[in-house]
Amino acid sequence: MRSERANGGVDCGQRMKVQPAYIFALTRTLRDLGRDPSALVSPDIDLDEDEFYELCVKAHEIADDPSFALRFGSSLHLGSHGLLGNALISCRTLRHAAEFLVQHSPVRAAQASVRFAFDQEGVVLSITPGGEIPGAPDFLVEAFFAAVVTGIGELVGGELAGCRIELAGEPRMPEEVYRRYLQMPVVFGRPANRLIGPREAVDLPLVAAGNSVADMYVRQCGKMLRDRDKPVSCTSEVHRILRGSRGQVPNEYEVARRLNMSGRTLRRRLKCEETSFRDILDAVRNEFARSYLAETKLSIAEISAILGFEDAANFRRAFRRWNACAPQDFRHLANGDGAIVLGERSPPAVAAEFIETTSF
């Protein structure tokens, strides 16, 4: 492990992709099996995808149990997947969730491919593994489907009737073990690894269907996930944390804690990148403010509260400073209700910029 990781800091040129919750799930699953996970790294250490693969190899060796992948996948709830999980929770239907999962699949590390399609048998979610864990050729497939089944259960509030899983391999343990963790009939020796379900189920409304900001949040998460392969800077990490917050916006010291550094170190690194926490916070608040104004019917007071302003008057002043127009004027222009020109920049220009930069 590289020294900068061991020191718990942010390596600004390094890609940090794997959710700490995945590492925690590996260690927790080992403990549930009565194994000692101390040989694995701390969940607080950021790993890239290749390092996480090696961690899975080591965890499988320690587990010495054929059900390990199923247990691990079943322990991954939607919240374990970070931005991806938050976006899936905000999807309006299972079709929407499946399409988003395919587009932003977390299994790209192993060069795997995930597909969502319809055929004569129904709706199909399939995975083609691109590699194997030594001694556990089906590890990735089993963990993937176990996690998917757990996620579906959270989205629909229970089991989804009429589904089955087809696996290309042969069973390596009693079939009731597969049914216990996959929670649906399992067929082995098939041409592909697939989850097959009824067509009518994919378009049933989920909990988020009535949430006025759900679509906006899914787009925000999608943009951040598309950017996940770019080199990581301290600035981009702060952006990621602020954009990923739902509810109360974390302050500077909370963000520093999540990045395993002091507030003073965070300020110093941001200064080296010619920015500040306040600048980033204002940029993220403005980004969300424009989205709320253009895409929802939330009142100005409601938006100001969501963004952490003490009152609507403070929000209006800040929005005018950021965009040279009032929030209500931006809303009118974004919705095509008129043409108003105020300040140094015209609201049409601001609205056009918003549409260009937030398209999904």
Image (cartoon, rainbow, N blue to C red):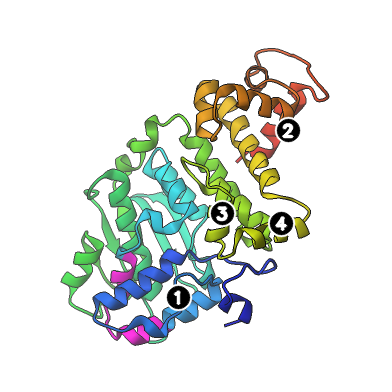
Is 271 in the magenta? no
How packed mark 3 is, by other alpha carbons closer than 10 Å (few <14, some 14-19, many 20 or more), is: some
Is label 1 or label 3 in front?
Answer: 3
User: Label 2 belongs to which residue?
Assistant: 353
Magenta segment, principal secondary structure? helix
First to last magenta residue range: 58-73
Q: Nearer the viewer, residue 225 or 188?
A: 225
Q: Label 2 sits on what residue type? A: Glu
Of pointers 3 and 4, the one earlier in the residue sequence: 3
Q: CA distance from mark 1 to mark 2?
A: 43 Å
253 lies above or below 356? below
Is 63 in the magenta? yes
Q: Nearer the viewer, residue 167 or 267?
A: 267
40 lies above or below 201? below
For the question of whether residue 106 can be seen, the reply is: yes
Q: Label 1 sits on what residue type? A: Ser
